[in-house]
Amino acid sequence: MGLRGRWFGTAVSRKGKWDALVVGGGHNGLIAAAYLARSGLSVAVLERRHLIGGAAVTEELVPGFRFSRCSYLQSLLRPSIIRELELGRHGMKLLKRSPSSFTPCIDGRYLLLGPDSTFNHSEITKFSKKDADAYPRYEKQLQKFCNFMDFILDSPTPEHRRDVPSFTGVLRDKLQQSLFWTHCLQQAYLLGQKDMLDFVDLLVSPASKVLNNWFETDVLKATLATDAVIGSMSSVHTPGSGYVLLHHVMGETDGDRGIWSYVEGGMGSVSLAISKAASEAGAHILTNAEVTQVMVNEDSGAVDGVMFADGTQMHSSVVLSNATPYLTFMELVPQNVLPEDFVNSIKNSDYSSGTTKINLAVDRLPQFQCCKPTLLEAGPQHMGTIHIGAESMEEIDLACRDSWNGLPSRRPLIEMTIPSALDRTISPPGKHVINLFIQYTPYKLSEGSWEDPSFRESFAQRCFSLIDEYAPGFSSSIIGYDMLTPRDLEREFGLTGGNIFHGAMGLDSLFLMRPVKGWSDYRTPVRGLYLCGSGTHPGGGVMGAPGRNAAHVVLQDMKRSATI
């Protein structure tokens, strides 16, 4: 397809036939493109918006302030991707947070947690010596489980293939499946029966049960429980929420497990680094390129390329969709080419969301009444994730129950982060960028409308007032803000139902069940069409594994086709 290693923007020719087209320039789509281009294929990434990155973007929404508009922390991006695509060389700079967590209490106490075990012991001892002694054992057990999961995250699922044409191909697939399960059994054996039972218990149990078995302190349990419900419509008492807790501690920063970091320049810097790696390998990236249809040949039933909003076309026998499964199959693919049972499964998947993101520009740091004032310099309480409205698991459960009744939580669960405490590149001197990740805000409301400006403003003020309870005067520091409700996340970023994971992360929607049973290996009922987004195994977050795994499946299929 011509020149290599150039940024083509919207100027790439849409003529000719490409080896592969990627619909959606989110981080997974860019990663898939990078691996395909590194294998020598001609690849084009087609992004609807004016900038790449999907939900991992940096945008200047208030003059002088640059916001990680959707995703706002980095930890889950697989180490293999960072290493293989040399993202550090391409400009990705991680800023470790220490302490990493701060939970203020109305009664004047607070809990700080971080990577230092001695510091954690001292902090938790303020509430319970028993819990302080148990916490290192809890972390060690979770690390064992994360080590067990590493192989599964970095591997395509051992799905049963429907389209293997030869006896040799069948044997090859059975061998691959056997190798996958053999490795898992070896890891289970090394884990041991007791730990394996604890692992299964974590997967299927409510997070509240898991944490109650470990700890007695309400504020510690609530702080840890937020990881189990983030981005979901689940309560801490929902069976299976224990897995979501594990999902959010699987990551690392520079080899340190469970450590989340800011990215210098915002989360868009992650996408930019990946795009540079993809472009260097020869991938072409188009923005303002809205795909409205995946074209399927009526005679062969195979993919033939894509059609854009302006009616023009690009042709390829391989298309990877980084869109949600619902958007891909209900809006982009012609309905008459999909099996009815498959369509029903996609329609009936859970895309519910309880997430609202508010990005704020402020003229000063919040001053928490439980801490000594730090007017100019950021203190330990400003460095990590600040948990508001999470002093007990029952508070979280009550907030969730409001949303089940179609109401925004009366006392929302808020995760506040202040990336400008470490990143000096995103705000003017003395001023700060603040992210509020808020739950629970249902997509479908029983009263009011997210389209009503006064309703939106009322909810935003409810959140600001809650923060005022812990940091008096916070509301008066706000210069401007941007608010994304579930409907905004769907409209602006294509996240069906506003779900940040491209679909719920319940046990019925993971591994061999993601996105639907029988189609977990990135392939689809349409020959040549693949999924590469968070709606596939191993799920959501800025992880990159779906994009990397999907690219490997595509390359494997191309190699097989070439030998037939």
Image: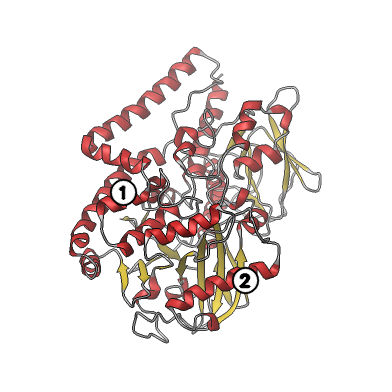
* Residue closest to the eye, 346 or 449: 449
Where on the picture, by quarter, is residue 52? bottom right
Secondary structure at badge 1 equals helix
**What's the residue type where badge 1 is placed?**
Val
* Residue closest to the eye, 72 or 13: 72
**What's the residue type where badge 2 is placed?**
Ser
The residue that mark 1 highlights is 210
* Residue closest to the eye, 48 or 462: 462
Residue 294 location (% of width, % of height): 71, 37
Residue 225 location (% of width, % of height): 37, 56
- Residue 1 sits above or below residue 272 on the image: above
- Classify the position of the C terminus by image quarter: top right
The residue that mark 2 highlights is 458
Decide if residue 56 is in sight here. Answer: no
Q: Residues within 10 Å of mark 2 (few under 14, many from 20)?
A: few
Q: Residues within 10 Å of mark 1 (few under 14, many from 20)?
A: many
- Classify the position of the N terminus by image quarter: top right
